[in-house]
Amino acid sequence: MLQDWIWLTTRKALGPRGVLRVLEYFGTPERAFYADSEQYDQIPELPAAARASLREKRMDEADRILGECDRLGLRVMTLQDGDYPGRLREIAAPPAVLYIRGRVFRFDEEAAIGVVGSRDPSPYGERVAAQLGLELARGGALLVSGIAQGIDSTALKGALKGGGPVVSVLAGGVDVPYPSQNRFLYEDVAAAGALISEYPPGTRHKAEHFPVRNRLISGLSLGVVAVECARFSGTMKTIEHAMDQDRDIFAVPGNIDAPRSEGPNWLLRQGARPVTCTQDILEEYWLRFPQKLAQSAPLPPEAAQQRLEQLRSRKGPEETGPEEEREEAPAPGGPPEDGAPDLERVPRGEQRSRFTDDQLTLLRAMAGRKKTSTADELVEETQIPARRVLSALTMLQVDGAAREHPGKRFSPLVELEE
């Protein structure tokens, strides 16, 4: 029964590891509840206070918590539930019970990325966190973070602005905003995604809860990004959990004399993957989550070219035969050939959902030129790195929004409404 799970996880001095030891010994919370007092002495490595707490058989607290969950509309998920995240089940000390306010995600099917950092970031760190949150959300990833002031809340706000789902893992009850000034952000996260905690409703956020909570941020994620933090900090504790859990580690480089970049720069020296743009993160997971990321995330150049070639191979002879052979190459840099199709007009409200930021920038750049453009010309004009320009051009062709002419020159097939 759910009541037994809550009884077990609220025993004093037990903690997540102690709960697992009890479950390993008895098999179920119900058997642990009905066990004889002497049996608790047989469980290895349990402190005396935990054994004493197990001997308290009253269900008053469990009943109160269940009543609060019902009142607040919370989902209570246990280790035995089929939709309990497999990623979390595999960590060293998975929580036996999760309290969830908002959506219930199938984390094993999500490209979930943890974004963590200092509570007192620099303007650079805030700008990067907001951009990462926004672009991860637009790219189809699920952003996972805490909800503290600083990098956590800034990344969450960016993801919410990007219209994506978000998950915040808490060190207290999901009904207890912390800090209090974030109460409106709590509501926004619960409406767009989920607030998750292993602590029952009404639990205050305590200092000792945060290191325990951090293992869940990394445990739910495929990879964790450190934006700004000190070398020894709560953020680095989360990264240590991620390393222990064999998660991917990303770090945002910073100035060598910036104290808040000491942690990320140290991680980069240890082999963390550098983040110079959001695509550095998304491209690691596109092939694993094509249905989640393919529609909006920029593809790695190799994957994008492969997709374009696959689409071309499906064309019939009337599309790939004599017409292409008879096509006359225009003069280098000249205008698109006569008889080009009318440009599709894309309303302003549809542009963000259809194109990435890079693609929109390239479309505007090509529209401002009266001749076809090479990739190098677009790199120079937009200052977007060549790899991203090539990937965006390929995806624009796949989408039917751009056309390649002989000489590797490009022109738009759409017109963006201003």
Image (tube, rainbow, N blue to C red):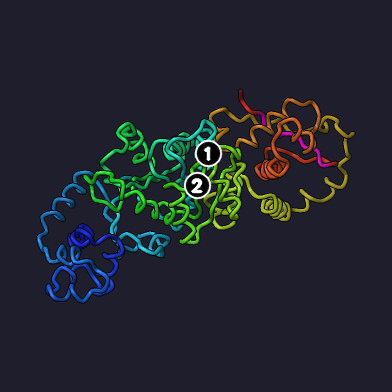
Mark on residue 123? none
* Position of residue 147 in the picture relative to residue 380 (left or right): left
Q: Secondary structure at mark 1?
A: helix
**Does the magenta segment cover residue 299?**
no
Q: Is residue 302 left or right of residue 159?
A: right
Q: Residues within 10 Å of mark 2 (few under 14, many from 20)?
A: some
Q: Is residue 418 visible?
A: yes
Q: Secondary structure at mark 2?
A: loop
Q: Give the residue displayed 16% in from the left and 55% down from the top.
A: 62
- Estimate the spatial distance between the alpha carbons at disc 1 and disc 2, rounded to whole Å: 9 Å
Quarter of the rendering occupied by the C terminus: top right
Residue 27 lies, with reference to residue 267, above or below; the image says below
Q: Which residue is mark 2?
A: 231
Main SS type for the magenta part? strand
Instruction: Give the magenta range.
Output: 408-415
The location of residue 37, given as percent across then percent down, is 12, 72
Q: Nearer the viewer, residue 73 or 313?
A: 73
Amino acid type, residue under disc 2 in the picture? Arg
